[in-house]
């Protein structure tokens, strides 16, 4: 670690983050990036063993593993209580936990239970965690903090057979805007990162073939998930007087802009 990195790490001592969905994928990459930068990070997710595996990737950091199903209000309440008890304050929530739902199912055949599961995780879970963070940031001293919601390029352009996921990501954009407005009075900055084709287990199928709007199946480029993590860290480490309201980070050549 050089002198600049040492100084940056020292400046972040005492900074605390909650990362949901921290047991894999984007959540794991962001948690590790923050831990290695000097943040204390509460790792939230449904499986304790995967959260502990994330913590082991940054043993030099200060982490707290809290098994949490974000769709359950009591478990979200327990998460933020644990963070308050361990760290005393909260500076960042990366609202990341989510699921795509059943792939390849035509809308007319989509089971109601599958729709509810995606909505409960992606939207209701994001609401519950944002509310828990907002309350703590409003009450703590000094007051304030930052919430970064993990959106998706699906909040702009859907994929075929993605109604539950796409609907929740559009709704998440509305939540981001509302919280950004409501948080001003309390020093709470709220932004959103919309991600396209980061290389994770969830997007593994993109490299072998994904259904396109014209009905064809074609492989798609992906990007290193660490580039997403670095972007989230940049957003997180801005002073609260500055905010990245929306950022879009995607694989450069993926079929998103124009006609592919």
Image (tube, rainbow, N blue to C red):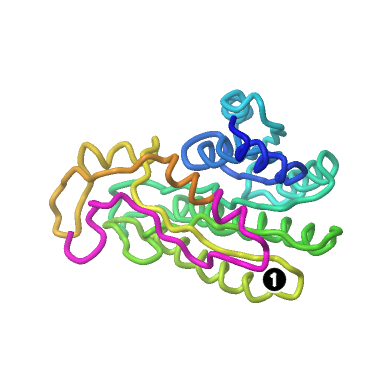
**Splitting the image into 4 quarters, where does residue 43 fall?**
top right
Residue in view at x 48 percent, y 52 percent: 118
Q: Is residue 256 left or right of residue 247?
A: left
Residue in view at x 59 percent, y 52 percent: 95
Q: Is residue 88 left or right of residue 94?
A: right
Residue in view at x 74 percent, y 44 percent: 79
Above or below residue 184? Residue 69 is: above
Q: Quadrant of the C terminus?
A: bottom left
Above or below residue 155? Residue 218 is: above
Could you tell me if residue 41 is visible in this image?
A: no
**Splitting the image into 4 quarters, where does residue 190 fall?**
bottom right
Confirm whether the magenta stretch covers residue 162.
no
Question: As rendered, which of 99 and 259 lies closer to the eye?
Answer: 259
Magenta span: predominant SS is loop
Could you tell me if residue 238 is visible in this image?
A: yes
Above or below residue 195? Residue 47 is: above
Q: Local crowd at mark 1 within 10 Å, few (<14), some, or many (≥20)?
A: many
Residue 145 x %, y %: 71, 59
Question: As rendered, which of 102 and 173 lies closer to the eye?
Answer: 173
> Tag 1, which secondary structure?
loop
Residue in view at x 75 percent, y 48 percent: 74
Residue 194 x %, y %: 43, 58
Q: Is residue 185 left or right of residue 242?
A: right
Q: Residue under label 1, please give it.
A: 183
Residue stretch in magenta = 233-260
**Splitting the image into 4 quarters, where does residue 63 fall?**
top right
Residue 171 x %, y %: 50, 67
């Amino acid at each position: 670690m050089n002198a600049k990195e040492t100084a940056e790490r020292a400046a972040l001592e005492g900074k605390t983050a909650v990362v949901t969905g921290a047991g894999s994928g984007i959540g794991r990459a962001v948690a590790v990036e923050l831990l290695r930068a000097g943040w204390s990070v509460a790792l939230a997710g449904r499986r304790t063993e995967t959260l502990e595996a994330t913590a082991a990737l940054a043993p030099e950091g200060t982490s707290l593993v809290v098994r949490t199903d974000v769709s359950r209000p009591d478990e979200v309440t327990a998460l933020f209580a644990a963070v308050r008890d361990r760290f005393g304050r909260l500076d960042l929530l990366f609202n990341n936990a989510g699921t795509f739902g059943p792939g390849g199912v035509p809308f007319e055949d989509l089971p109601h239970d599958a729709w509810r599961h995606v909505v409960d995780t992606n939207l209701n879970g994001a609401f519950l965690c944002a509310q828990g963070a907002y309350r703590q940031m409003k009450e703590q001293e000094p007051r304030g903090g930052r919430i970064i919601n993990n959106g998706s390029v699906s909040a702009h352009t859907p994929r075929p057979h993605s109604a539950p996921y796409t609907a929740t990501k559009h709704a998440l954009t509305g939540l981001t805007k509302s919280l950004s407005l409501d948080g001003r009075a309390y020093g709470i900055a709220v932004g959103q990162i919309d991600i396209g084709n980061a290389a994770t287990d969830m997007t593994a199928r993109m490299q072998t073939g994904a259904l396109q709007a014209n009905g064809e199946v074609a492989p798609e480029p992906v990007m290193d998930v660490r580039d997403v993590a670095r972007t989230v860290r940049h957003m997180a480490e801005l002073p609260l007087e500055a905010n990245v309201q929306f950022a879009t980070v995607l694989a450069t050549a993926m079929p998103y802009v124009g006609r592919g």
